[in-house]
Amino acid sequence: MKKIYYPLLALAFAAAGCTNGGDTQSAGIKMENMDQTAKPGTDFYKYACGGWQQLHPLTDEYSRFGSFDKLAEDNREQLRSLIEGIAAIQHEKGSVEQKIGDLFNIAMDSARLNREGIEPIKADLAKIDGIKSNADIAAVMGEMNYLNMFFVYYVDADIKDSKKNLLQTYQAGIGMGERDYYLDESETMKSTRDAYAAHVAKMFTLAGYSDEEAQKASAAVMDIETRLAKAHFTQEQQRNPEGNYHKYTIAQVKEQYPGFDWDAYLKGIGASAATEMSVSQEEPVREAIAIINSTDLDALKYYMKWALLNASASYLGDAMEEQSFEFFGKVMSGKQEQSPRWKRAVSAVDGSLGEAVGEMYVAKYFPPEAKARMEQLVENLRTAYSQRIDNLTWMSDETKAKAQEKLAAIYVKVGYPNKWQDYTALTIDPALTYWENAKAVNAFNNAVMMEKLTKPVDKEEWHMTPQTVNAYYNPTTNEICFPAGILQYPFFDMQADDAFNYGAIGVVIAHEITHGFDDQGSQFDKEGNLSNWWTAEDRANFEARTKVMEEYFNNIEVNDEGLHANGAFTLGENIADHGGLQVAFLAFQNATKDNPLPVIDGLTPEQRFFIAYAGVWAGNIRPEEIVRRTKTDPHSLGEWRVNGALPHIGAWYDAFGITESDPLYVAPENRVSIW
């Protein structure tokens, strides 16, 4: 479900332990990760990361493998040790250790899963078969809220009244996740659609349906999902906060969106207490209701059964899970083999009892001194950001004052929450199937979410677990968050010098701060409300400058089939990278002005700053994943977070002597200049 926050990566990975890296501890740079045969001005990504790419070739398990994934690999081993140790011992019923251990053991028991086959979902299938009329679908949607059907809901801060929580809908219901997979007429997308239709049919046959009925089901699914996709907002449209906010009383919702039993739906999802709701994207909800009311009931049942088969595949026997991987893993991402079962089981536990695992993880692997140093770094970056705002030539003093107020008000979270999630109400029962326990986890999380409806927004809530290798900015609470997982090499090294740490974690910190001032975050005030704090002239100047970045990235070809980056879709993240680099470099200069750093391994401190930044995005990626991420990920691909971002940073030119003769050179008048 949609959350209003902006992570460093689209997907969060579990973290590695807080270890140091690099043979040159004082510098932090691993020379073997570089390719010094490459020229910085021709391909800086290869220059800084080419060695890493050679040392970490893609294995069959991965569609993309980068620095984040390397940390995830290290960490899974640590989490595995923690969880297997718990799972090997009997624990008191109802204890968090019992829940962790039993869920892991259930996930690992492939013999039981294969023996049960599709038996665990038969009750769900029967519930769908028992629908008597189209009018009954709303109630079943609510009751089966663990499925991705038609549209979804969530509870989060009201973006225009940020201290209050609000029930909100979001467009959903399409198995491939993004409208272009249904509507794009390129050969790649047509081929993917054909493979998806075949996959849907195969899943129905594995569930015991005849070939004839499976083909009918596939046709119904493709028809309904294509209709939904046509109504869905584009990725660019979804980035407009005002255009995705339509708050009504529940009575008004019933008037505006008739033909749907809202009372039954709200009861099913546990939101009968809601008095208001924002229908984030109106057209998709209207189309979903139209489909429910106008489509043959049997076709609707096939669609709902598909949502069930798709959601439950990883909780059933090998046949269903392997078929799901055949499409989503191989066709859409280019992976060649599934992760081993223990990794999937660790991920399941981590995803279900994340803060319980996180509390244990932090106690064992996160040193207090890392938290203290990180908090100081954040304040140094905040100071540098304030300096950058003061020195802007395109912004009036009036708007600068508002920007400074917002910057000063940013709430900082480092390492782990001040209070941990209480899992007392969650029951994990080894006598029940894996799927039934997964539904219990969903019901628990749903109840926790629905409790927010009658409570004010809790600024202490975390949207990531401590063991996550990621970071985020949340505009409605005006906060930046850096879980323990990211506070390690290659982002953060307690033994490395300031050139490395400001180039790596320093840019990450400033990146997240900049999300408060990107094309979306800049529309929210210091209190987290969608409210204009700009003069008209300053806003126009800002938009003209961001347009330069949008058009620059639109011209980047990401593969040899003519696919271009989407500058509008990735604009917020590209602005954050740009601001992160500019601000972190100033903070680095501030930190070292009285004690200049030496040249190490032939690299100046300034050069090491930019090499450290590039190293964060080191990785290899498959052609299929390039397409998928370009369509679905608001972040630019790793290569272009380096080769696309650095040509707009003046200090990079100075550090490496980049001139007009270098392919990456961008004339000063054509460079982005914002924060």
Image (cartoon, rainbow, N blue to C red):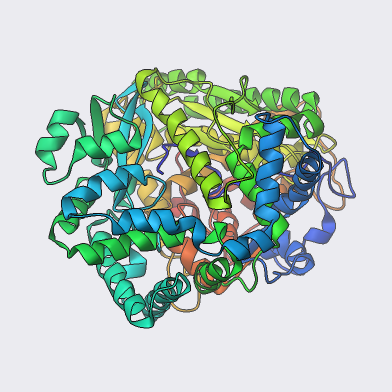
Q: Is residue 395 left or right of residue 645?
A: left
**Residue 382 seen in this snapshot:** yes
76 relative to 244, above or below: below
- Is 642 in front, or is 103? 103
- Is 20 in front, or is 423? 423
196 relative to 395, above or below: below
**Residue 655 seen in this snapshot:** no
User: Image quarter for residue 190?
Assistant: bottom left
Q: Percent from the top left, x then y, of residue 631?
A: 42, 62
- Is 237 in front, or is 578? 237
Question: Where the N terminus falls, by quadrant?
Answer: top left
What residue is drawn where x is 21% and y is 49%? Answer: 136
210 relative to 176, above or below: below
Q: Is residue 220 left or right of residue 372?
A: left
What residue is drawn where x is 38% and y is 58%? Answer: 125
What residue is drawn where x is 30% and y is 70%? Answer: 222
Q: Percent from the top left, x then y, of residue 220?
A: 27, 70
Q: Percent from the top left, x then y, of residue 514?
A: 50, 35
User: Image quarter for residue 350?
Assistant: top right
